[in-house]
Amino acid sequence: SYVLTQPPSVSVAPGQTARITCGGNNIGDKSVHWYQQKPGQAPVLVVYDDSDRPSGIPERFSGSNSGNTATLTISRVEAGDEADYYCQVWDGSSDHGLFGGGTKLTVL
Amino acid sequence: QVQLVESGGGVVQPGRSLRLSCAASGFTFSRYALHWVRQAPGKGLEWVAVISKDGSHKYDADSVKGRFTISRDNSKNTLYLQMNSLRVEDTAVYYCARGGGGAAGYFDYWGQGTLVTVSS
């Protein structure tokens, strides 16, 4: 079965750029979506279809996807960006959703 | 605005059943696929099941196959998850989520979740 691999944690200083990766076999052939989840809250979609942003999501959040790695980039990181981030794809061959294990972003 | 409100969670013994509901408002319910996603305490997100707009197609994760059934009532704008033969490992917060993007399958709106605890 298809597996999505994320680093357990990423740390970044305020104002710097955070990059969170999501690895998968030929993931560049799939559409990748990203969610932000703060403690005690439901996940929020921050990037869909590799690089599109839902309305209300700051331009600081962007995404890319190529080869075996998709990346969520958060520019000018703020303390409020501290959260868990999950990548997700839809496996069309089985009609199953699939999440990565999640990455905890710490703002130093 | 889009709202999804789950209910029906609680404490249940292993082997028993529970039915979750998700009441939707703020959008045309019958135009969207709907999903259940769960999160065990301190763990990551796990997709559970999806149902198509008209309820004719349903798919679920291997971990719940044969035990959980997703359904919907478009006249009541409500999504359901019937959970039978519950196991300790089914303990989680269960979220309903609206499907976006057609075949691309992402979740554009989520409810706040309802906690299911399976324990003797």
Image: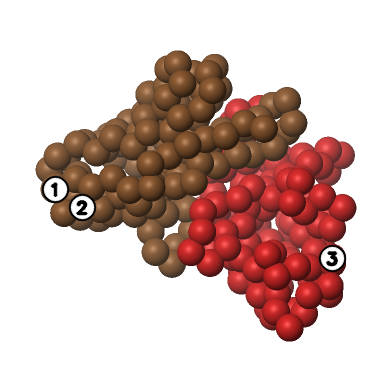
Chain colours: A brown, B red
Neighbor class of circle 1 (other Cα within 10 Å; few <14, some 14-19, many 20+) is some
Q: Residue at x 55, y 42 (%)?
A: A99
| Residue A13 visible in this rendered orientation of the protein | yes
| Amino acid, disc 3 | Asn
Task: Give a yes or no on whether discs 3 and 1 share a subunit.
Answer: no
Q: Residue at x 77, y 59 (%)?
A: B81
Q: Residue at x 81, y 62 (%)?
A: B82
Horizontal and vertical percent for residue A47?
42, 35
Helix, strand or loop at disc 2? strand
Q: Chain of mark 2?
A: A
Which of these two is toward me, B110 or A15?
A15
Horizontal and vertical percent for residue A26?
53, 18
Q: Taking B88 as reference, is B22 above or below it? A: above
Q: Are marks 3 and 2 in contact (CB under 8 Å)?
A: no
| Residue holding disc 2 | A107
Q: Are marks 1 and 2 in contact (CB under 8 Å)?
A: yes
Q: Residue at x 64, y 47 (%)?
A: B47
Which of these two is toward me, B45 or B5?
B45
Q: Taking B11 as reference, is A39 above or below it? A: above
Neighbor class of circle 2 (other Cα within 10 Å; few <14, some 14-19, many 20+) is some
Distance between mark 3 and mark 2 Cα atoms: 42 Å
| Residue B102 visible in this rendered orientation of the protein | no
Helix, strand or loop at disc 3? loop
Quarter of the image with the C terminus of chain B is bottom right
Q: Chain of mark 1?
A: A
**Which corner quadrant of the image does residue A30 belong to?**
top right
Q: Chain of mark 3?
A: B
| Amino acid, disc 1 | Pro
| Residue holding disc 3 | B84
Distance between mark 3 and mark 1 Cα atoms: 47 Å
| Residue holding disc 1 | A14
